[in-house]
Amino acid sequence: MENHPLNTSYPNGIIGNPDLPYINSLARNYSLANYYFAVASGSLPDYVALTDANITSVNSSCNAPSLGCSTDANNIIDRVEASGRTWRAYMEDYSGGCSGTGTSSFYVAIHNPFIFYSDITNNSARCARIVSANPGHSGSPDSQLISDLSSTTTASNYMWLTPNNCDNMHGECATATGDSYLSQLIPAILNSKVFQSQRATIFLVFDEPTYCPYGQCPVPAIWAGPATKFAYSSNTQYTHYSLLATLENVWTLQPLNSFDGAASAMLEFLNPNLTVGGVIVPIDKLAVISPFVVLAWIILAPTVGAIYFWHARRRRQGSSYTNEEYHPSKS
């Protein structure tokens, strides 16, 4: 998702906003990081941080891939493929071809970090793994993603979704439009075959706070799915590099550089004891909803049955929710 700080302690915050009931319920029922920070100002460097841990690998002034606006930096796709795992990136309103163009003005290339990596754009097989999330651009949200999640043979281990600039709360549409979008998309993911049968998780994250300095205002970062703890929050500090550190930890991947190598993995949000068919299994699928959601099987991807309701006392670090509103603020 795009351009909002964590909560209503900050301008235009998400958590505690009564006009955004779905994302608030998701944060209450699953796992919320209270101090998760962007690492730069501007979308592209934060998207690049989430995928190669180096905000300077692509010039932040770039608007689309070109000779001077690409990088040969190692990225998470290199690590995923080298480990024998699969990936696919879903972009709303994307026309394909690694060209950086879309089918509507709501698609912007700087929210598609994969087309800035030369080892992806110069490889037709890799380019083909960046697809439109919503072919036809009508009907239920992101039909291609939901279709792929109907089977373990079509769902990749690492799945990234970038919503368009209407659905992602960027500002072109009302913020409530993004909440409505999530209220349709997330249940469809959680009820999919993959999420109902695999240890999977969703990571829903915003790229930057925009309305206050990125180093001072945390952004919403929510883990959800069968491999995730319920009604949990933490005051441990994390950054965009922490997502990469988490993947590298659970999939035994080498760090891309010193930034993700030194970052704290977000393992506390994952349920290590989930069983499938009575057998304890490791995380296998992960889904990332880009600066909004990432999907993957670590099982780190989307899957879960029932929604857990928040408990009767105030949610504290490492504890469950309470019946009171929470607005964590850093002293």
Image (cartoon, rainbow, N blue to C red):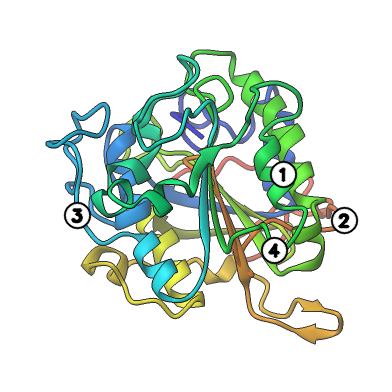
Image position, residue 1 (x, y; %):
51, 35
Nearer-N-terminus badge (3/2)? 3
In the depicted structure, whether residue 283 falls above or below residue 20: below
Separation of residues labelled 2 and 1 (CA atoms): 19 Å
Separation of residues labelled 3 and 2 (CA atoms): 43 Å
**Residue name at image x 62 percent, y 72 percent:** 284
- Residue tagged 3: 72
Asked if one can make out residue 228 in the rendered structure from this viewpoint, the answer is: no
Nearer to us of marks 1 and 4 is: 4
Separation of residues labelled 1 and 3 (CA atoms): 31 Å
Where disc 3 sits, the SS reads loop
Separation of residues labelled 4 and 3 (CA atoms): 30 Å
**Residue name at image x 68 percent, y 64 percent:** 200
Where disc 2 sits, the SS reads loop
User: 227 or 88, which is in the foreground?
Assistant: 88
Separation of residues labelled 2 and 4 (CA atoms): 25 Å
